[in-house]
Image (tube, rainbow, N blue to C red):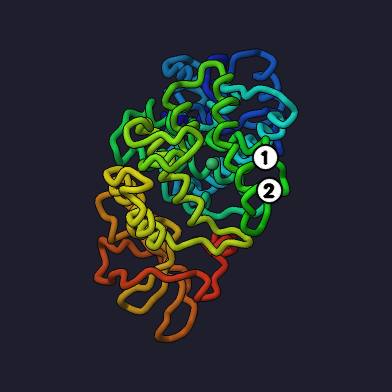
Amino acid sequence: MIKKIAIEQFKLGMYVYDLHLVWAEHPFDWHCFLLEDEETKAQILASGIREINIDTEQGEDVEVYSELSALAPTVIVTRTPAEEFEHAKNLYSNANKLMQGMMKDIRLGKQIELEQCQPMVAGIVDSMFSSPSALLPLAQMKNRDEYTFQHSVSVAALAVAFGRVLEMPREEIQELAMGGFLHDVGKAQVPGHILNKPAKLDDAEFVVMKNHAANTSVLLKEVEGLSEVAFNAAAQHHERFDGTGYPLRLKGDEISVHGQMLAIVDVYDAITSIRVYHKGMPPTEALRKLFEWSGAHFNPRLVQAFIKGIGIYPAGSLVRMESDKLGIVREVAVDKLLQPVVQMIYDCKKMCSLSPEVVDLSASNDKIKSHESFEHWGIDQAKWYATERC
Ligand SMILES: [Fe+2]
């Protein structure tokens, strides 16, 4: 449980969930971590913050009956949707920076430290459990220079959504997400001019690029404490159900279920991502493609489950209503895939923008008529998220 506590209640053994500071404003390597030493505690106290969020599932709880807690009440945190979005934005940015730093370290010959990734992956899992509609649309938007890092975070987040629809235990989902976060670390050893080439790779370049899957295996074998679930998921994400993948050309059940899942998530994220040189396929079209490729490239049973988990109109999609209004999907409940919560933005009949209006379609007579392309309507999705979202 996430609790907001007064700084006076803070003690060793607590798990820091949110310092209420952005990454750049604090000296700590991680955003979420277990407080284990007096030195770090002193640094936190010196930062001047008055409140801190802790996760009582991963560390010590407050002493409810102490005299101190009577003076400084504990608040159980329930974030508003706007706060969830802000939290997801910070998390996404911090996780990208962590992956960027790790890849730099790999290029310098350093080993991956699992302890560095665990708090961040736990944060992604937590965000996806409490509000998947906040993190997923953000994770869809990538910029060219940071694509590889952002893709890693995105794949971890999507893996959580996938694990949840298969009703996997949370511990297993966390390991799958770890595999997602680390799945492309082998790209650190691919030369930048190939990795970031804004055009199709030639045959020789493609061979070098494909090596990243084997590189990932080699790097992850050295990581102390990495689970089998995480290792297999990452090492097998380019294997294909019909045996045409790489690096080992594994086939069918020779590929772990976690590797099979990550293969689907990896391709979905790659084809739906919005990049400078890549428009990003609408989610409905991408899901149709995955369905088409299932049987050959992917396990059909898992593709069907993934489609169910992501929804026909995932959060972040642009949709046209029967009332001829355009809206952006804000939240999707698993049991109401066709009736998400939508923020209406434009009236196509009157040809005018609408003042922000958020409609829960499960309590409205209006229905979604079709999926629309952002590009067709001249809407910059990333800009909209930064400025217009209410
Ligand atoms: Fe990959």
- Would you say 167 lies left or right of 281 here? left
- Asked if the residue at tag 2 contacts the one at tag 1, i.e. Cβ–Cβ closer than 8 Å, the answer is yes
Q: Label 1 amino acid?
A: Val
Label 1 packing within 10 angstroms: few (<14), some (14-19), many (20+)? some
Disc assigned to residue 65: none
Q: Nearer the viewer, residue 69 or 22?
A: 22
- Would you say 320 lies left or right of 206 here? left
Name which quarter of the figure residue 41 lies in.
Answer: top right
Label 1's element?
A: loop
Q: Tell me the residue that label 2 is attached to.
A: 194
Measured as percent of width and height from the top left, residue 346 is found at 45, 76
Answer yes or no: is residue 52 visible.
no
- Would you say 188 lies left or right of 371 here? right
Q: Label 2 amino acid?
A: Ile
Extreme residue toward the bottom, this view: 350
Quadrant of the frame with the N terminus: top left
Residue at x 39%, y 40% (from the top left corner): 243
Q: Nearer the viewer, residue 321 or 68?
A: 321
Name which quarter of the figure residue 250 lies in.
Answer: top left
Q: Tell me the residue that label 1 is attached to.
A: 190
Q: Is residue 188 above or below residue 66?
A: below
Measured as percent of width and height from the top left, residue 367 is found at 28, 70
Residue at x 43%, y 32% (from the top left corner): 176
Measured as percent of width and height from the top left, residue 223 is found at 57, 20
Residue at x 31%, y 72% (from the top left corner): 369
